[in-house]
Amino acid sequence: MKFNKKDYTANDTYIVYSENYYKCPLKKDNKSFEGIVEARRDWHLSKNVPRKKQNKIFWLRALHRNQIFKDLCLSLNNIRGSLSSWPYSYEEAKEKGLPPFEGIQLEGIYSKKDDEFLGFCINRISYQNIYNIITCLLPEHRQKSIMREVDIAGGKFIFLENDYLSSSYNIVCTGGEFKGSHTIIEQQKLMDPNFDISTSEIFKTYERGYEEIYSKITTDRGSWITWINLPENKKYKEAAFEYKDLYRVI
């Protein structure tokens, strides 16, 4: 069946609030559409962005995937009744006759003050594991510690409220230096004093018109909970956090 954006309701699947920001599956308003274009405007060395038709396809595909994932969550709720009883692996899903709990989501990041679009991230969900493929903020909102605050609230949501098993991120480390979420790097070093980003899983891309080197870093639930409970992280543990999980039976 062809997807119709008029039927899109996935942006209410969940909302995660920090003190100043919130994130949720992408809204279908014009500001969000324009924002996912502008956040990628300087992505490529040539400063070119995809043509209008390609941008629309990217946006519609994101909405469609978000809707598919929400429908999957609702379907599993009808079968199992709660997130804690959803399948944890392909083998378990197959054995119990359940649909695979996998999907791709594009989340929008917004300001709590005025609902301004700030950026987006694309995540792959595979059972109880989340892999952050990419995060893009509008140029004027970078280097402002927005993602530090958003990541802390997001960690509480997936690990404390939803019992996910792991979360993975791609960290840019071109030239031997990492760029991106310092919070993630800090977590890794506190969990493993011998952590060295240069020895983690490394891969290269040329999507930006030049070689970019990434390190894939994975944090498991137990390690994250240990990290958030350290005395020196009291400010993170007590940081503002609220959520609405609109598809889950509580």
Image: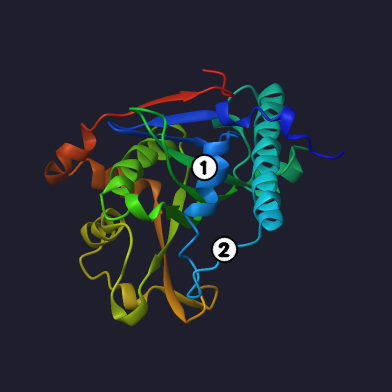
- What residue is drawn where x is 57% and y is 19%? 249
Say which label, 2 or 1, has the lower sequence index: 2
Q: Quadrant of the N terminus?
A: top right
- What residue is drawn where x is 32% and y is 54%? 142
Q: CA distance from mark 2 to mark 1?
A: 20 Å
Local secondary structure at mark 2: loop
The type of residue carrying mark 2 is Val
- What residue is drawn where x is 85% and y is 40%? 2
Identify the coloring: rainbow
Which residue in the protein does label 1 denote?
Answer: 107
Quick check: 201 left or right of 185?
A: right
Residue 131 in sight in this render: no
In this view, 56 is above or below 194: above
- What residue is drawn where x is 56% and y is 23%? 248
Residue 53 in sight in this render: yes
Which residue in the protein does label 2 denote?
Answer: 49
Camera-nearest residue between 71 and 167: 71
Q: Residue 153: x, y in percent?
A: 34, 37
Q: Residue 51: x, y in percent?
A: 66, 60
Task: Name the residue furthest left.
Answer: 232
Quick check: 241 left or right of 201?
A: left
Q: Residue 229: x, y in percent?
A: 21, 40
The type of residue carrying mark 1 is Glu
- The crowd level at tag 1 (other Cα within 10 Å; few <14, some 14-19, many 20+) is many
